[in-house]
Amino acid sequence: MEPEPEPDPEAQLTSVNASSFVEPYPEPEFSHSVQSILVVVAVIFMLIGTLGNALVILTLVRMKNRTITEVFLTSLAFADLFVCVVCIPLLIVGITVHSGHTGFSYIVEQQVFYSSSVASILNLTAVAVDRHDVIINPMNRRITTTRCKYVLVAVWGISLSAAIIIYFIPAQYECILLAVFLFLPLYIMIHCYVKVLKKAKAASEKLTQNKKGDAAQKGGSVDKTVRMVVIIVVMFCVSWIPSLITRTLKYTIHMEEMHLSILEITSCLVAYGGSAINFLVYAFMSRRFKYALMQMLGVKTYCNKVMPSTKSAATNF
């Protein structure tokens, strides 16, 4: 009786590797026209977002006597800039090389995506709390100038930790963690802004009754910073919720690989587009920002139109 042949270790290793490293989502093949359209849109977002957010950061950093809100908006601009200079180029690599969301570039892109998106909404939450305290409870503010630094460290520490946790947990549970980081801060923001708007409405009614000009500046109109941040929050929801929905559908509904890849890339482009154009809200809603920007660019004539006096430039946001 002949002895049985010994199993080939190399063949066993090959078998193990084949079963352990199966690509979960096969790479579809986009047509050249689809690739071209997606790449052109991504490049436009990358250029606009990089230049715009860099300009916002330079302007806000150069501003003297920055408010706590402006500090957090600077941090928000950094988060948006990371998306534009890291995530969008890696998405372009995914479109052109892998025809979708696969490969090592996808892993890096998603980690930056998670950390930047969580940082964005936490910065916006901090701004909402600060605006609430300034208007509702000015004598007992929770985020002081000293505490602001610690809050920034916490914001980015939590954001990076969230990205690391999502990397190690099963992929099908990532949408649950993202939903927590999205909807809990949104609840806090909505709670803060509802109280602020009620305060503004009460001040407006009081002004109507008293008809005093001094009251108009204090509370007759809705705070411009509040309106600006509310618009940013709405843009954030419109930008990031599609990505959350896509990640939920990815693990709950069976879809063809081509449709899934196009859906993922489209939702990412919507999210990255929001990060790219956030700076437009700063430019059109903040008088202090427009004044500082025009000063930096040396456009003195426009400075006088935006802020007729130096006192206004220091007090209006």
Image: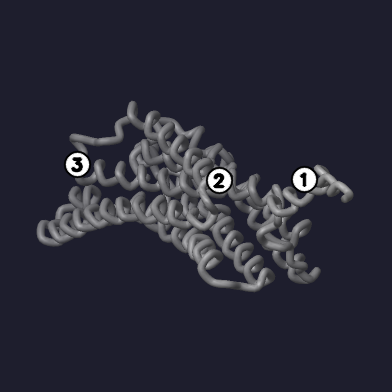
Going by the numbered disc 1, the residue's amino acid type is Leu
For marks 2 and 1, give the CA distance.
26 Å
Which comes sooner in the sequence, label 2 or label 1?
Answer: 1
Is there any visible trace of residue 291 in the rendered image? Answer: no
Mark toward the viewer: 2 or 1: 1
**Residue 107 drawn at (x, y percent):** 64, 48
* Disc 3, SS: loop
**Residue 186 drawn at (x, y percent):** 35, 54
In the picture, the disc for residue 137 is 3
Where 141 sits versus 302, above or below? above
* Disc 1, SS: helix
- The residue that mark 2 highlights is 167
Apparent side of residue 299 relative to residue 92 in the rendered image (left or right)? left
Q: Quarter of the image holding residue 44?
A: bottom right
Where 75 sits versus 84, above or below? above
- The residue that mark 1 highlights is 13
Q: Tell me the crowding category of disc 2: few under 14, some 14 to 19, or many 20 or more residues within 10 angstroms, Cα based.
A: some
Q: Residue at x 70, y 57 (%)?
A: 23
